[in-house]
Amino acid sequence: MPANLPPEAQAKLAEYSEARTTEAKIKALEEFLKVAPKHKGAENLLYWAKRRLAELKEELETERRKKKGGRNPFVVEKEGAAQVVLFGIPNSGKSSIIAATTRAKVEVSPRPYTTLVPATGMLPFEDIQFQLVEAPGVAPGVNWIHRSIGLVRNADAVALVIDLSLNPMKQYKYLKELLEESGISLKKPEGKVEIIKERSGGVKVVLLGEILDGDVDKVKEMLRAYRLHSATVKIYGKVTMDDIEKAILGTSQYKPSIILLNKADVPGAKEKVEEFLKSYDGEAPVLVVSAKTKEGLDKLGPTLFELLELVRVYTKKPHGDIADKPLVLKKGAKVRDVAKSIHSRMLEGFKYAKIWGPSAKYPGERVGLDHEVKDGDIIEIHYKG
Ligand SMILES: Nc1nc2c(ncn2[C@@H]2O[C@H](COP(=O)(O)OP(=O)(O)O)[C@@H](O)[C@H]2O)c(=O)[nH]1
Ligand SMILES: [Mg+2]
């Protein structure tokens, strides 16, 4: 809690919030980290400061490159249905997996640290594609770890690439901890905290779920301690006070993940997989693969599709042909989201939609904006244009 921060740490935080330039913000946060307390109660704040510092450094780098007329190679623009970052130690086979599953020409090398600029490739799955992005290999002591983590933060999902010629559990724990330290959680949260900052009106708490170790007054007290005087806090499902603090600081983000145990072809791999699965307690799906023999890699596309909870809908104009490329939306999407993703005019002038496929009661059913679409639906939107 910021309330029991020593005065010099408070002062540095104030300096940070008043700083105008990226350089000044970086300086204030670095000084804050030097004087901040290291006890359990300040953990979330420390994570926040570290993460913010890494982001600011990355912003500074982007600003510098822009001035020189270039762009930051560590920001990879999204393409395809979703962006999936391959995250692992050097030499775990990230480049090899991209080379084995996409048409991209990537450099595979037995020398570590080959990939300092992210390699990318498009993985086809049925009629869509996933963008695979290789994050520079992470290991204790390498100094671009925050860049690799930044790539994970901006992606739709992360694949932990683990080398079966080494100790898989040790790598898994290391990778998971690196991400957790940066506020990226691989576990789907049971509840959700949403904080909407307002200009005035005080703090309102909308309790649509349950606070396991506190109550509405405690939430208000915590917001005051963080100097949030006007905000609406919405709580869904089961949450803890720690979750609420993380939401205030923006330090916790759930990232869907899969685990790729790579190099399944090496001697002893089978025993290591068994060993790993015995003590693995995560929720992420585990695929045993080999970039060398391509074993198991055919499951990558379908597993990602399932993990990302996507639906594909095919649009059609009245009396026209069905689009051969689908729109890709999140599971739970409604006709409203389909219309919005095509054109705002379609939503504003919406009259009705006709649906064929899995979500239709009968072919050509007429539905409204609140109708939930399903994977494989064909949709025809009628609107006043
Ligand atoms: N036996 C075996 N070797 C692999 C496999 N995948 C990658 N390698 C080797 O591991 C080394 C590092 O691969 P690379 O893809 O460059 O790793 P990265 O640093 O994670 O991108 C290279 O010598 C690859 O040939 C695999 O599935 N089986
Ligand atoms: Mg590589």
Image (tube, helix red, strand yellow):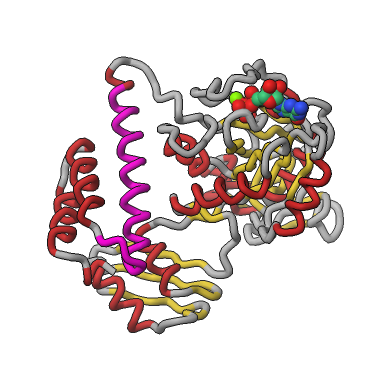
Instruction: Give the answer, above or below, for where 346 lies relative to 131.
Output: below
User: Is residue 51 in the magenta section?
Assistant: yes
User: Whole-percent x and y of residue 179?
Assistant: 50, 49
Q: Which residues are magenta?
A: 37-64
Task: Report the front residue among 241 and 8.
Answer: 8
User: Whole-percent x and y of residue 49?
Assistant: 31, 51
User: Is residue 268 in the magenta section?
Assistant: no
Q: Is residue 167 left or right of residue 365?
A: left
Task: Report the front residue among 281 and 368.
Answer: 281
Q: Is residue 160 left or right of residue 44?
A: right
Instruction: Give the answer, above or below, for where 28 lies relative to 197.
Output: above
User: Whole-percent x and y of residue 297?
Assistant: 79, 35
Instruction: Give the answer, above or below, for where 331 lies relative to 84.
Output: below
At x 58% / y 30%, what residue is drawn?
90
Q: Is residue 124 left or right of residue 68?
A: right
Q: Is residue 117 left or right of residue 233?
A: right
At x 79% / y 56%, what residue is drawn?
359
Image quarter hosting the N terminus: bottom left
Instruction: Give the answer, above or below, for where 2 lies relative to 53.
Output: below
Outermost residue to the right: 362
Question: Can residue 86 be seen?
Answer: yes
